[in-house]
């Protein structure tokens, strides 16, 4: 038995149960599917693999599909709505999600899945995603350097269970928080698409022949990043946020991970950030003042630094030109200061730039506000989750 939970601190009406005791079955997805069994989306059945599960959700962008013949033949790896799926191998092993009604039918490979009894599916998934559950899952890793979590170990994992009604209340609370987070993410994507469409219409589709042609330096000031000494870097939030490169970028704003006590090259809040080392040309915006490593450059409009919306969408419109430098490095692609200075671009009339900024600034401000709200809700979720999972905080409080 795997003693991953303690009984003494649980509320009196909670129990400890193995996953195998509360599930119809604990199974492993098919291992070793060969190419003849794959097909296209129109003729196949979705195949959920480890790379499709990230941060508690299914990533639909890189789904593979297997033939219907394969799916119907391999009943032991067939998924149903309500199944909890756990990644058993790879860099994201331990990542967990619950299958909702995304598919009419689906199969799986290289993951472990189980179907908890009615009322507990979401709760058990939340427990496994909590810091307590993640620690328990990762501690089960065995085997080679890559590491594997085997089916038997997951089946033996012990989960604290409240009464069904309380489990459903906890599940509903987190469904509500995560639903709000998803809504804000979708709204941000829609808002950015709206602003980008406006930029393309005004400055590309309706561009006039008489507009001046200049270089990037004519419109924008920019600084190239320079990494501080490694001794100054920390994850304890000491000093200023530090972004090394593209790996820190998010949808619109980078995700803070590392800080430095000796900031060198500094970007201001709402400066446009461009990755300058492989991969070259990805675009983000600084949420707040930050230190830039050598993989990032920061841009702001030369004539009115507060025109951050125009700067951001102009740099996005030039992304393909910038990305051409991806193949120019000796080993890794990169773009330098002199390359940016020579980059040609059309310079629109000042009054049109002003009008665009006035129209799009409220959109970008809403994106920033939504992002801040997402951060607050995510922190609330991650703080509450482990405490609710072991009864330290009760739902009525």
Image: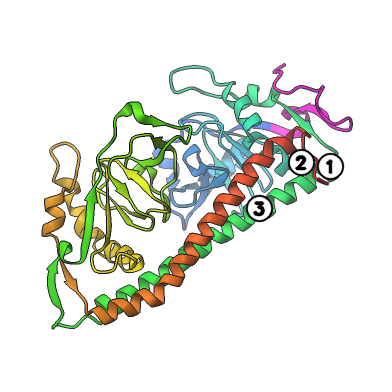
Q: Residue at x 31, y 77 (%)?
A: 354
| Foreground pick, 324 / 244 | 244
Q: CA distance from mark 3 to mark 2?
A: 18 Å
Do labels 1 and 2 touch, CB within 8 Å? yes
Q: CA distance from mark 1 to mark 2?
A: 7 Å
Q: Earlier in the sequence, mark 1 or mark 2?
A: 2
For residue 177, the mark is: 3
In the image: residue 84, left or right of residue 248:
right
Q: Secondary structure at mark 2?
A: loop
- Mark 1 or 3: in front is 3
For residue 164, the mark is: 1
Q: Which residues are magenta?
A: 1-25
In the image: residue 259, left or right of residue 46:
left
| Foreground pick, 318 / 305 | 305
* Picture quarter with the N terminus: top right
Q: Residues within 10 Å of mark 3 (few under 14, many from 20)?
A: some
Instruction: Locate residue 187, reporting x and y percent.
Output: 52, 65
Instruction: Locate residue 305, reporting x and y percent.
Output: 30, 64
In the image: residue 139, left or right of residue 303:
right
Q: Is residue 191 above or below residue 112?
A: below
Q: Is residue 66 above or below residue 363?
A: above
- Mark 3 or 2: in front is 3
| Foreground pick, 72 / 357 | 357
Q: Secondary structure at mark 3?
A: helix
Q: Secondary structure at mark 1?
A: helix
Q: Which residue is mark 2?
A: 120
Q: CA distance from mark 1 to mark 3?
A: 20 Å
Quadrant of the image occupied by residue 131: top right
């Amino acid at each position: 038995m795997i003693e991953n939970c303690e009984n003494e601190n649980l509320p009196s009406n909670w129990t400890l149960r193995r996953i195998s005791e509360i599930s119809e079955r604990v199974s492993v997805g098919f291992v070793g599917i060969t190419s003849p069994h794959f097909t296209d989306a129109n003729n196949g059945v979705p195949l959920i693999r480890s790379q499709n599960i990230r941060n508690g959700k299914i990533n639909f962008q890189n789904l593979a599909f297997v033939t219907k013949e394969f799916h119907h033949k391999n009943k032991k790896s067939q998924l149903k709505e309500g199944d909890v799926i756990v990644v058993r191998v790879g860099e994201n092993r331990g990542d967990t999600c619950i299958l909702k009604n995304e598919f009419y039918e689906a199969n799986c490979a290289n993951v472990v899945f189980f179907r908890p009894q009615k009322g507990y599916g979401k709760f058990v998934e939340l427990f496994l995603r909590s810091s307590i559950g993640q620690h328990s899952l990762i501690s089960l890793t065995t085997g080679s350097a890559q590491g594997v979590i085997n089916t038997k170990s997951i089946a033996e994992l012990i989960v604290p269970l409240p009464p069904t009604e309380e489990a459903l209340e906890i599940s509903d609370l987190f469904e509500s928080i995560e639903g709000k987070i998803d809504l804000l993410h979708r709204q941000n994507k829609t808002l950015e698409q709206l602003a980008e469409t406006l930029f393309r219409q005004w400055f590309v589709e309706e561009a006039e022949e008489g507009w001046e042609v200049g270089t990037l330096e004519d419109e924008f000031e920019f600084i190239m990043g320079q990494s501080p000494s490694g001794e100054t870097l920390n994850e304890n939030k000491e000093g200023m946020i530090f972004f090394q490169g593209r790996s820190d970028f998010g949808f619109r704003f980078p995700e803070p991970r590392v800080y430095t006590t000796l900031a060198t090259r500094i970007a201001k809040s709402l400066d446009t950030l461009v990755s300058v080392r492989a991969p070259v040309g990805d675009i983000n915006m600084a949420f707040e003042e930050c230190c830039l490593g050598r993989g990032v450059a920061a841009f702001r409009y030369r004539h009115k630094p507060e025109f951050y919306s125009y700067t951001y969408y102009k740099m996005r419109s030039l992304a393909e030109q910038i990305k051409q430098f991806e193949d120019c490095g000796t080993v890794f692609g990169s773009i330098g200061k002199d390359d940016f200075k020579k980059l040609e671009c059309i310079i629109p009339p000042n009054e049109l730039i002003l009008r665009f900024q006035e129209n799009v600034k409220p959109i970008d401000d809403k994106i920033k506000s939504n992002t801040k709200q997402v951060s607050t809700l995510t922190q609330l979720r991650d703080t509450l989750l482990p405490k609710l999972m072991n009864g330290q905080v009760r739902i009525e409080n």
